[in-house]
Image: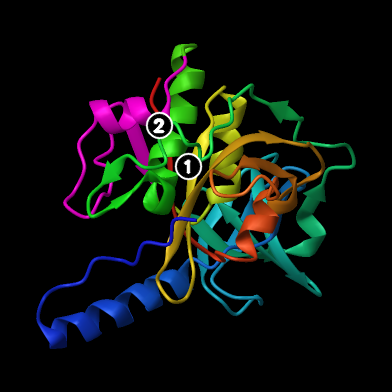
């Protein structure tokens, strides 16, 4: 399994600051297990989104009738929602909830490679090799194989791409990195557009690992349990929820453009 610690500076003081910053960043993006999709259910007027759960809190914006949003939580008369970049509270009586499944099942035929395969496990990456730190390379190979329709192996990625001295991949120019906190809906949108998503998670210690999301089982809500993954280090981990038990902090999503 690839558990590569975050890079830190050479001076001891900066090392400590860097580690603390990394832990705080990880804590800020600890993953929510699920999110339900709702909509503005007013008769005619818009729905005010407030900074807190009560009429005394200031209004951030007003959402038009029918606007969809993610339901983060509900407490009595107030519901915490997220709509795009806006997070706030709305009155629960005007929150519509769908009764039919809103997220269709998706299953992209992404091939499965492991970083332990003897054909490339011993290939050098920085001061190590694919077996030990090759999860990023292996996920990229799976993604590129699906994108091109050809057999792009981890050995191909090692041979044709650039890496840091420590063995970290410099992402090809046709790949996009996403660090927004609405990763659930973002990942699903990419899958719905026919693009697998490479997921980077982290432990509190700073060690990290990459897997690729290739499908969703469908349902009323977005849940980590329903995202299907290929883990280059474990054939036994098949859902994102299983992976998040070991790497609970979200770092980023990566996928190809187009």
Of callouts 1 and 2, which one flags the residue occurring earlier in the amino acid sequence?
1
Q: CA distance from mark 1 to mark 2?
A: 8 Å
Residue 62 position in % (x across, y down): 56, 53
Residue identifier under label 1: 115
The image quarter in which residue 66 lies: top right
Judging from the image, what secondary structure is the residue with disc 2 in? helix
Residue 153 falls left or right of residue 211: left
Please give the name of the residue rendered at 54% of the width and 31% of the height, measured from the top-left corner.
196
Residue 47 position in % (x across, y down): 65, 54
Relative vertical location of residue 16 with respect to residue 77 in this rendering, above or below: below
Instruction: Tell me, for residue 154, which label it has, or none.
Output: 2
Give the magenta-colored segment's residue range.
151-178
Please give the name of the residue rendered at 27% of the width and 49% of the height, measured from the top-left corner.
168
Q: Residue furthest left?
A: 11
Q: Nearer the viewer, residue 81 or 257?
A: 257
The image quarter in which residue 82 lies: bottom right
Residue 142, magenta (yes or no): no
Whether tag 1 and tag 2 are in contact, CB under 8 A, the answer is yes
Relative vertical location of residue 85 with respect to residue 235 in this rendering, above or below: below
Instruction: Tell me, for residue 145, which label it has, or none.
Output: none
Q: Nearer the viewer, residue 80 or 202?
A: 202
Q: Quadrant of the C terminus?
A: top left
């Amino acid at each position: 399994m690839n558990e590569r610690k975050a890079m830190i500076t050479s001076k001891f003081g900066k090392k400590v600051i860097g580690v603390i910053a990394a832990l705080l960043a990880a804590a800020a993006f600890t993953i929510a297990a699920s999110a339900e999709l709702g909509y503005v259910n007013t008769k005619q007027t818009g729905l005010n989104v407030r900074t807190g759960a009560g009429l005394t809190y200031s209004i951030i914006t007003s959402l038009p009738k029918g606007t969809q949003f993610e339901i983060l939580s509900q407490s009595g008369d107030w519901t915490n929602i997220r709509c795009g970049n806006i997070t706030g509270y709305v009155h629960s009586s005007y929150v519509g909830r769908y009764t039919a499944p809103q997220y269709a099942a998706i299953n992209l035929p992404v091939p499965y490679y492991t970083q332990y395969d003897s054909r490339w496990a011993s290939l050098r990456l920085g001061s190590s090799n694919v077996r030990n730190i090759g999860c990023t390379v292996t996920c990229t190979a799976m993604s590129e194989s699906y994108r091109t329709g050809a057999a792009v192996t981890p050995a191909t990625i090692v041979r044709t791409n650039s890496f840091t001295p420590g063995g970290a991949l410099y992402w090809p120019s046709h790949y996009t990195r996403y660090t927004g906190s609405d990763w659930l809906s973002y990942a699903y949108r990419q899958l719905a557009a026919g693009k697998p998503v490479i997921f980077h998670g982290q432990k509190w210690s700073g060690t990290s690992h990459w897997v690729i999301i290739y499908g969703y089982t469908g349902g009323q809500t977005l849940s980590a349990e329903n995202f299907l993954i290929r883990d280059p280090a474990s054939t036994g981990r098949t859902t994102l929820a299983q992976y998040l038990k070991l790497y609970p902090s979200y770092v980023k999503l990566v996928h190809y453009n187009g």
